[in-house]
Amino acid sequence: MSAWLSRKVSAFTIHDVDGSEAQKEAVNYIAKEFEVSTENLRTIVKQFNEDIDKGLQRHGATVAMIPSFVQGRPTGQEKGKYLALDLGGTNLRVCEVNLLGDSKVTIHQQKFVVSNELKTGEMRHLCDYIADCVDSFLTENGSDKLDSDLQLGFTFSFPVNQTAINRGTLMQWTKGFDCHGAIGKDVVIMLQDSFRRKNLNVNIAAIVNDTVGTLMANGYRDPKSHMGVILGTGTNAAYYEKMEKILKWDHGEINVPEMAVNMEWGAFDNERRVIHLTPYDNKLDRESINPRFQIYEKLISGMYLGEIARNVLLHLIDRTLLFNGLSSIDLNKQWSFETAYMSTIEADATQDLSDTQHVLESILAIPTTTLIDRQIVKKVCEFVGVRAARLSAAGLGAVLSHCNKVEEGCTIAIDGSVFEFYPNFADNMMAGLKELFGDQIENKVKFSLARDGSGLGAAVIAMMAHNAPKI
Ligand code: ADP
Ligand code: MG
């Protein structure tokens, strides 16, 4: 093993990577660029805590801290049939949720594709399309003949300024959506209008952020659930906040001890004060449809990780340190290196890294790769993936310390493919929390995979909203 190999780069596990001195030096340099030291983590947590306070104090803060109007916790005894709709991820999903009590539930669902044309066209067309999808779902599932309105929980996972449980204006699009005629408008009213035009007996009882849905879905099974986190296409989190700490609350007197707050944490450090951005991140940001926004999200979530890794690979190719200097038409395309490929590559335990070879040569049409090339690609994925998990840990750490949950402990409900499938993501997050709070945190804080936030969670919220007095 060479000196380079035996050198421990903080936070990264070193595998055997052979190669020329220039290759080793380049990989080493990239490792440094992506490193988040324990000290960095602490600085980020401190800033995060300040931003949480700012967001709770006033409107318009970077970390928006949006009160969700969801008060009270589910008991698991809730019963009834509800609809749920999920917009904001990869697919549009329509669900019929049957709450059976005793933490039991059955869900029927159907997924619909939202084309790029719809994502960036007129909001009216998108709403009409959603209404058509709900209509076709109800026709197929035979639920359209009910006399009374069906109550629907609408998971709309974008920053929304809520003014009631079923009222909210869109503040800004994220994650590749950019429909005209939606920002500043009430999305519930727009969608309800489409339902009305199509004679659908469906009432939108609640607008739900997927983070709050995730928190409530997990709460239906585990009363210790305190926080809901998304690590999927995008990233965001929600948690129960004491009402008295939501200083900016201006929707009249309410007599509840706590409320779920949607943090909109993807915007954290848009000011670029504490997170170090590499040139690969800046390239991604500049070429995105929302430059200088959602900076934290861009370093963590599934929509972006592959693209950051791609930028690193192209840089190495251009320096003739990878693939003998040859790229491919596919790899040259923006977004072509999917985050799911990174999972495959990081999980590749074959001697000759043949799974990695498959991704590079069969899927991305790189003419030939050597074992050293494949080792380097694997390292690059690891750098990007480990950093994402460590930055996520900073966000979790900020909420845990803000809520005094470090000693007491809690369950953190997490949804999203990055958490579910990315190798070692959960372990790397927990390692970050241990560096911040000590080893005992592992016995206090539990990560719980909660897949059904936008189905079960949204249904529970629709039920609570429909039965509760309006605030
Ligand atoms: P959504 O956030 O859209 O509701 P997901 O949680 O499934 O849905 O997240 C989708 C994102 O996860 C996509 O950006 C995709 O690139 C990424 N992804 C899909 N499969 C994997 C995987 N196996 N490993 C890591 N990321 C993945
Ligand atoms: Mg989702």
Image (tube, grey):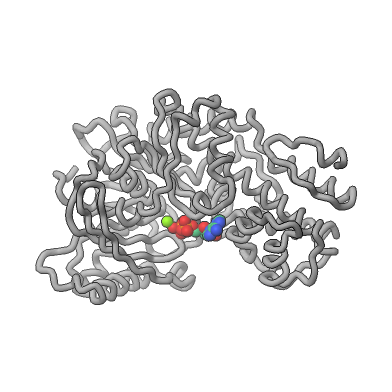
Image side of residue 193 versus residue 278, left or right? left
Quadrant of the snapshot with the N terminus: top right
Residue 421 on image: x %, y %: 53, 54
Residue sticking out furthest to the left: 147
Image side of residue 131 versus residue 30, left or right? left
Instruction: Report the front residue among 441 and 288.
Output: 441
Image side of residue 304 versus residue 247, left or right? right
Instruction: Report the front residue among 152 and 411.
Output: 411
Quadrant of the snapshot with the C terminus: top left
What's the residue at 47%, 43% (across, down)?
Answer: 265
Relative to 103, say whether 127 is above or below: below
- In this orientation, does residue 59 appear? no
Residue 228 on image: x %, y %: 39, 43
Q: Quadrant of residue 314?
A: bottom right
- In this orientation, does residue 220 appear? yes
Instruction: Report the front residue among 185 and 67.
Output: 67
Residue sticking out furthest to the front: 351
What's the residue at 24%, 67% (across, down)?
Answer: 193
Residue 157 on image: x %, y %: 39, 54
Residue 9 on image: x %, y %: 74, 37
Q: Quadrant of residue 331?
A: bottom right
What's the residue at 57%, 50% (across, down)?
Answer: 298
What's the residue at 64%, 28% (across, down)?
Answer: 39
Instruction: Report the front residue among 458 and 183.
Output: 458
Task: Count the numbered circles shown.
Answer: 0
